[in-house]
Image (spheres, grey):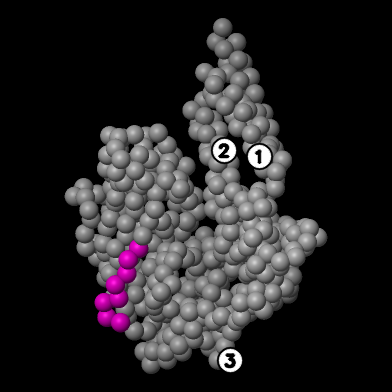
Amino acid sequence: MKRAGIFILIFLLLAIMSGCSSIDEKMEKGHFKMAKTQINNLLAGDNVPDLERIALEEKKDIMHRIELDFNKSLDDILPDIKKYYPEVTSEQLRAWGESKALEKMKINGEDRYFARSARNLFRIDKDAKAQMIKIDGEKKDELVSFLEQNLPSVIEDVKNSKGVTGKSLKIKFTYTLTVDADAVPAGEMIRCWLPFPREGNVRQQDVKLLSTNMEDYILAPNSQMQRTLYMQKPAVAGQPTIFEIAFSTTTRPQWFDLENAEIKSYDKNSEIYKTYTKERNPHLLFTPAVKALSEKIVGDEKDPYQIVKKIFNHITSNYPWAGAREYSTIENIPEYVIANNHGDCGQVTLLFMVLARYNGIPARWQSGWMLHPGNKNLHDWCEIYFEGPGWVPVDQSFGRQEVKNPEVQGFFLGGLDTYRLIVNDDYGMQLFPAKQFLRSETVDFQRGEVEWRGGNLYFNQWDYHLELEYLNQ
């Protein structure tokens, strides 16, 4: 009888695994209704192991997130396109779709467009961008103007310091996360993880927690690569649930003159080299697409600095910034960038990192916030390692600057300005204390995470806000 019971259990597990494979195929083809029905039928059974049940629920969650991202019909986006193309044709729409400049998915048999696809079109497609400029006129971005003034002074400060850092800036932060009223039943405990600064980097020091709006909290140790401050609070009927912290840091710019630096051969037996040049599932894999792109960019180049310079410049020139769908819905982010010919800050950073690692250049993730006056936002960048200089910052999204000064032009390959908050020194890491349900953001951590015993609370169920005060500017 025991043997028969084992055979029955094996049969059920195989059936579930076969069902999951079919579900994945349906999801890949956009047959979400059929996939959800199949999942619900499986979950209705009594013999689904707990881990399989969790995996199935997460698949439903991912489909829901994709539907939130791709929530526009063609009729929804046409008014924004017709502002610049009043007589837009079906042929133009087809061409933009094929080039991935106009991002869409087939969901349940219908074309569904990414929520920011119309605006992104005029960032991604060169002709569309030119048409927008023709109608609206050339407008210089405030951040571009700020950097043009700021970066030369940063380089001068660093040179005068005889080191690699410049003048410090002390900043006070007030971070608030607000869960919607009645997002969970009254009395249920809401668990919240808020971003908190990492310590130990020369660019970010004197980290101090100033206040919280609750007496009880758990501050994650600095050993947590994605650092958090955790609080929990019961929901009150009809009222939003608010979590708030205040902290301060002292930040410094950093710049390495890599054009004139002495860069030695790598010690390939070192832990740094072995750890940060290896593949890592799912976003740092040496796939055929990555290898082919590397061959196109790098060719026979062997010098480490020249390799990363080629990668940095190629991504800057060929993968324009565009608003991104949620990372948790993308299986392999670098391949997504290559296939879609665009990416936001974290997406092009991961593409840079995988190309660097494939070519034997140690690379690691870093992210948090950009804090430039009037331009604060979530932001991702990375660091690469050279024997001699050590770890140096790279902001692939800011890219090569369109100025004549060659030092300023290449600043972000080896430099970062003062206006940064480091929350993460790695991606996709476990939070502290551990989260029970699928994170809203599975790769990065900047906005926070929220859940209750009934599941994760996704981004559409809460909001966040960061206030800055520059204390010695």
Is residue 472 inside the magenta stretch? Answer: yes
- Amino acid under label 1? Met
Q: Position of residue 127 (x, y in %)?
A: 72, 73
Residue 56 sits above or below residue 10 on the image: below
Mark 1 sits on what residue?
Answer: 27
Q: Is residue 89 magenta?
A: no
Question: Any mark on residue 59, and which?
Answer: 2
- Whole-Å distance between the Cαs marked 1 and 2? 9 Å
State the image coordinates of residue 380 (x, y, percent, origin top left).
49, 65
**Comes first in the chain, label 3 or label 1:** 1
Which image quadrant: the N terminus? top right
Q: Quadrant of the C terminus?
A: bottom left
Secondary structure beneath label 2: helix
Which image quadrant is residue 188 in? top left
Mark 3 is on which residue type? Lys
Q: Nearer the viewer, residue 71 or 26?
A: 71
Residue tagged 3: 404
Q: Who comes first in sequence, dot 3 or dot 2?
A: 2
**As displayed, is residue 249 above or below residue 455?**
below
Q: Secondary structure at mark 1?
A: helix
- Residue shown at the point (43%, 41%) measured from the top left: 456
Residue situated in front as seen by the camera: 228 or 373: 373
Per the image, label 3 sits on a secondary structure element best described as loop
Asked whether disc 3 touches disc 2, contact meaning CB atoms under 8 Å apart, the reply is no
**Nearer the N terminus, badge 1 or badge 2?**
1
Left/right of residue 128 with respect to residue 179 in the rendered view: right
Q: Residues within 10 Å of mark 3 (few under 14, many from 20)?
A: few
Place of residue 92 in the rendered image (x, y in percent of width and height, measured from the top left): 77, 63
Left or right, 37 with respect to 392, comes to right
Residue range (magenta): 466-473
Q: Pointers 1 and 2 in contact (CB under 8 A)?
A: yes
